Amino acid sequence: MGGTMRLGSRRTYFEFADCKSAKLYGGVSFVDERHRHRYEVNPNMTSQLEDAGLSFVGKDETGHRMEIVELPDHPYFIGVQFHPEFKSRPGKPSALFLGLIAAACGQLEAVLQHYDHVSLVVPKKIVMSNGQSTIKAHQNGNATKLSNGLVNGVYSNGNGVHF
């Protein structure tokens, strides 16, 4: 039924600081995520896959096991070996899920420029030179009014961050 079970928290090192997944994790050099699988990318095929356009942006501590793959020119193509849902919590979503939602809403570039996942700092408002906000973030919780008084501001009632 496949190879050896890879189970538990494992460290993944980013190969490139400017990839989408590294930016979503707040620019850190590595992340610790939980694994539960028996599969891996065939190391004999990585150069062929890279020649075809895939970019292996995250690797294990040995540098031989591919953990995160991206298509750099795609709006949001990120594949991972680990389970980001295992550490995702209300009020602290997985960086990769946040990126997926932001990309679906057309807000990924704004999030990549202004979001700090490590401390969960979500910008309340990002204003472009034309005076328009480029990001819309909503955080569920107990707040009864807008946090910054604007329609496109951050709402808070303690149940997560929403764009």
Image (spheres, rainbow, N blue to C red):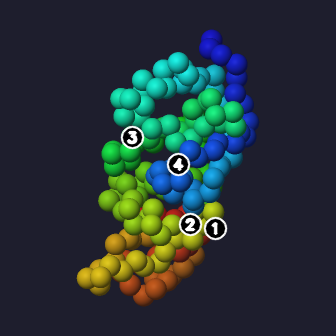
Name the residue tied to disc 2: 116
> Which of label 4 and label 1 is nearer to you?
4
- State whether residue 159 appears in this view: no
**Which residue is identified by label 1?**
119
Q: Please provide percent x and percent y for residue 150.
A: 38, 84
Q: Earlier in the sequence, mark 4 or mark 1?
A: 4
Residue 9 on image: x %, y %: 73, 40
Residue 94, which numbered label? none
Three-letter amino acid code of the residue under disc 2: Asp
On residue 16, which mark appears?
A: 4
Q: CA distance from mark 3 to mark 1?
A: 27 Å
Please determine whether, in this image, residue 84 is positioned above or below residue 25: above
Say which residue appears at 37% left-offset and 54% top-offset: 103
Q: Is residue 150 above or below residue 99?
A: below
Q: Residue at x 42, y 87 (%)?
A: 149
Query: Looking at the image, which residue sits at the far top?
Result: 1
Specify whether 32 is left or right of 114: right
Q: Earlier in the sequence, mark 3 or mark 1?
A: 3
Spot the residue most to the bottom: 149
Q: CA distance from mark 4 to mark 3?
A: 13 Å
- Whether tag 3 and tag 1 are in contact, CB under 8 A, the answer is no
The secondary structure type at the circle numbered 4 is loop
Mark 2 and mark 1 residues within 8 Å of each other at the beta carbon:
yes
The label number, if any, that marks residue 71 in the structure image? 3
Report the quarter where the C terminus lies: bottom left
- Residue at disc 2, secondary structure: loop
Q: x, y (%) of residue 59? A: 60, 37
User: In this orientation, which residue lies closer to the viewer: 17 or 99?
Assistant: 17
Give the CA distance from mark 4 to mark 1. 21 Å
Q: Is residue 43 left or right of residue 129?
A: right
Instruction: Tell me where residue 114 appears, x and y as whole percent.
Output: 47, 70
